[in-house]
Image: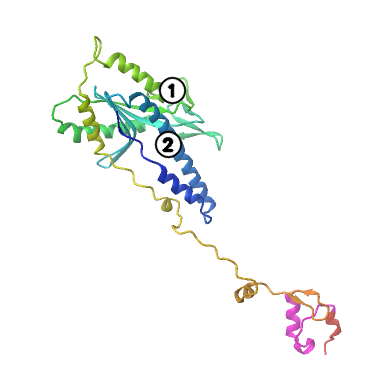
C-alpha cells in the first residue's frame, strides 16, 4: 500500500527555467543553472523509474507499505530516503535510486566512477552504498529512540536492508576484483521489484515453509503512518542566493531618441570643411577654432587652409 507519494519537483524546475530565461544572466551563472537543472532532471528520472516498479509490485499489497521521498532528522543528522519499503515481517528496505545513463563503473579498489559525456572521461563520485547506509543508520536511530519505545506491544528489532537501485536504462560496469558489496547492493530496479515479489511469495507468506507475520495489516499501516509523522519536507532551495543572481532583473537602459539633448551630448561630433564640404577630423577643426583671427571662427580642411595664409 502506498502511504506517501513522491514530492512534486515542479516548483524547483520552474524556478530554474525562469532564471534561464532572464536576459541579464551571466554566462557563468547560466552554465551553473543548466548543470543544476540537468542534475535535478537526471535524479528525478531515476527516482521516477524506481517508484514506478515499486508501486507496480507493492502498491496494492496490504502486506507492504511504501513511502517515497521520506526526509528524517535525528539530532544533527538528516536522511533523505528516496524510497522506504517495509512489510509485516519487519523488513525495512532503505532504497537509494540512481540513474547513470552514460555508465557507472566500480573499480577494483572500490572507487565509483561515472562517465561524463560532455568531457568524455570518467569522473569520481562518492560511494552510493555508503550514502544509503548512512541513511539507514539515521532511520535505525529514529526507530530505536522515537518509535519502538512507544509501541503498545513489544516487537523484535527490524531488519534494515540498505540498497542502491538503478534505473533499468542505466549502464553498470563492475570490474573483476571489485568489492562484493557492489554486486549485492547495487541492483536494477525492475529486477529487484520482481525478485523481491518472488521471494515474498516463496518464503514470507504463511505456509508449510513460510514465516508468520509479526504485524497485522492494520499495525503495518499504523507503523508507516507513524514514520510519516517524522517527515520533514526539504525547504525550497534559494537559487538566487546560490547563483548570486539579483531577485529583480536588471533593466537595460533604452537609447535616447535621436536628436534629444542626452543623445546629442553623448554622440561624437562630426566636422566638415566650411568651403568644400569635406569631412575633417576633430583635431583639424580644433586647430581652426584656436586661430579665429586667421579662419574667422570656421573650420577648413588642410587643402582649403592654404587659402588663408598666416598674417
Quick one: label 2, few (<14), some, or many (20+) residues within 10 Å? Answer: some
**Magenta residues, start to end:** 282-303
> Residue 92's mark?
none
Q: Residue visible at 20% across and 27% down? A: 218
Assign a secondary structure to mark 2: helix
Image quadrant for the N terminus?
Answer: top left
In the displayed orientation, state which residue is furthest to the left: 152
Residue at 48% from the left image edge and 32% from the top image edge: 114
Question: Residue pushed farthest top?
Answer: 208
Mark 1 vs mark 2, CA separation in Å: 28 Å
Q: Nearer the viewer, residue 210 or 135?
A: 210
Can residue 188 be seen at all in this image of the molecule?
no
Depth check, front residue: 123 or 249: 249
- On whether residue 292 falls in the magenta region, the answer is yes
Residue neighbourhood size for the residue with mark 1, other residues' Cα within 10 Å, grouped as few (<14), some (14–19), many (≥20): some
Q: Which residue is mark 1?
A: 178
User: Is 203 on the left-hand or right-hand side of 46?
Assistant: left
Name the residue beneath numbered marker 2: 44
Rendering quarter of residue 311: bottom right
Q: Which residue is depicted at the point 30% across and 24% down?
A: 61
Q: Is residue 106 left or right of residue 278?
A: left
Q: Where does the image place residue 121, in percent across and percent down from the top left?
A: 54, 34
Amino acid at each position: 500500500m502506498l502511504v506517501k507519494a513522491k514530492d512534486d519537483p515542479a516548483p524547483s524546475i520552474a524556478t530554474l527555467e525562469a532564471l534561464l530565461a532572464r536576459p541579464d544572466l551571466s554566462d557563468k551563472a547560466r552554465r551553473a543553472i543548466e548543470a543544476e537543472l540537468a542534475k535535478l532532471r537526471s535524479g528525478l528520472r531515476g527516482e521516477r523509474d524506481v517508484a514506478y516498479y515499486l508501486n507496480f509490485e507493492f502498491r496494492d499489497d496490504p502486506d507492504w507499505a511504501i513511502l517515497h521521498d521520506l526526509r528524517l532528522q535525528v539530532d544533527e543528522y538528516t536522511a533523505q530516503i528516496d524510497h522506504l519499503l517495509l512489510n509485516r515481517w519487519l523488513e525495512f528496505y532503505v532504497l537509494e535510486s540512481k540513474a547513470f545513463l552514460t555508465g557507472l563503473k566500480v573499480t577494483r579498489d572500490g572507487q565509483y566512477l561515472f562517465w561524463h559525456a560532455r568531457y568524455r572521461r570518467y569522473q569520481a563520485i562518492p560511494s552510493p552504498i555508503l550514502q544509503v547506509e548512512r541513511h539507514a543508520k539515521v532511520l535505525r536511530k529514529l526507530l530505536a529512540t522515537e518509535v519502538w519505545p512507544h509501541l503498545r506491544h513489544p516487537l523484535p528489532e527490524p531488519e534494515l536492508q540498505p540498497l542502491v537501485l538503478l534505473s533499468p536504462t542505466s549502464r553498470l560496469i563492475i570490474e573483476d576484483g571489485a568489492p562484493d558489496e557492489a554486486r549485492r547492493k547495487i541492483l536494477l530496479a525492475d529486477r529487484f521489484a520482481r525478485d523481491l515479489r518472488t521471494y515474498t511469495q516463496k518464503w514470507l507468506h504463511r505456509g508449510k515453509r513460510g514465516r508468520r507475520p509479526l504485524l497485522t495489516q492494520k499495525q503495518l499501516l499504523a507503523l508507516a503512518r507513524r514514520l510519516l509523522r517524522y517527515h520533514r519536507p526539504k525547504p525550497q532551495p534559494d537559487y538566487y542566493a546560490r547563483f548570486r543572481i539579483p531577485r529583480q532583473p536588471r533593466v537595460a537602459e533604452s537609447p535616447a531618441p535621436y536628436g534629444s539633448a542626452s543623445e546629442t551630448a553623448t554622440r561624437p561630433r562630426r566636422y566638415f570643411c566650411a568651403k568644400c564640404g569635406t569631412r575633417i577630423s576633430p583635431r583639424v577643426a580644433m586647430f581652426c577654432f584656436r586661430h579665429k583671427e586667421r579662419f574667422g571662427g570656421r573650420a577648413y580642411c588642410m587643402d582649403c587652409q592654404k587659402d588663408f595664409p598666416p598674417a
